[in-house]
Amino acid sequence: MARYDNQNRRLCTKTTRKGNPCRAPALKGGLVCNKHGGSLPNVKAKSARTLLEGLVEPALLALDTILSDVKQPASARVAAARDILDRTGFKPVIQVQGVPSRAQVADWIEEAEAEQA
């Protein structure tokens, strides 16, 4: 069971050398304090992922609110719809037609230099 201090911060889950519970606040989104490994890069990354995962549902609800509200400007509703579609795999397809040869690039450079002269 998670422990919290009087400021409603989650406390570290580790114990001191004497066996008492650590009283330091844990990283936001994490389980341990800096002394018990909270400063390690992988622990920081996991804490950040946990915080971001907690923001997914509120962000989706905000987009849904904007999309559904006819009082919102059309540009805001279109932007919300585009964001939802982009993040669910319905992005516009960008195709590369081909890579120019060195000769074509050299020709373009010559043309550009001729125009500047």
Image (spheres, helix red, strand yellow):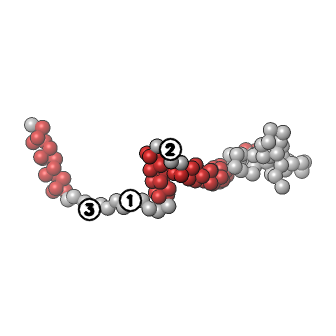
Q: SS of the residue at dot 1?
A: loop
Q: Which of 84 and 51 is in front in this view?
A: 84
Identify residue for label 1: 92
| Mark 2 or mark 3, whichever is nearer to me | 2
| Mark 2 or mark 1, whichever is nearer to me | 2
Residue 2 coordinates in the image, percent (x, y)? 81, 52
Q: SS of the residue at dot 3?
A: loop
Q: SS of the residue at dot 2?
A: loop
Residues at marks 2 and 1 touching, judged by CB atoms closer than 8 Å? no
Q: Earlier in the sequence, mark 3 or mark 1?
A: 1
Identify residue for label 3: 97
Quadrant (top left/top right/bottom left/bottom right) for the N terminus: bottom right
Quadrant (top left/top right/bottom left/bottom right) for the C terminus: top left
In the image, what residue type sits under mark 1? Pro
Identify residue for label 2: 72
Q: Nearer the viewer, residue 100 or 39?
A: 100
In the image, what residue type sits under mark 2? Gln
Distance CA(mark 3)–CA(mark 1): 15 Å
Q: Which of 7 and 63 is in front in this view?
A: 63
| Mark 3 or mark 1, whichever is nearer to me | 1
Q: How crowded is mark 2: few (under 14 residues within 10 Å), some or many (20 or more)?
A: few
> In the image as oriented, which residue stretches furthest toward the front?
70
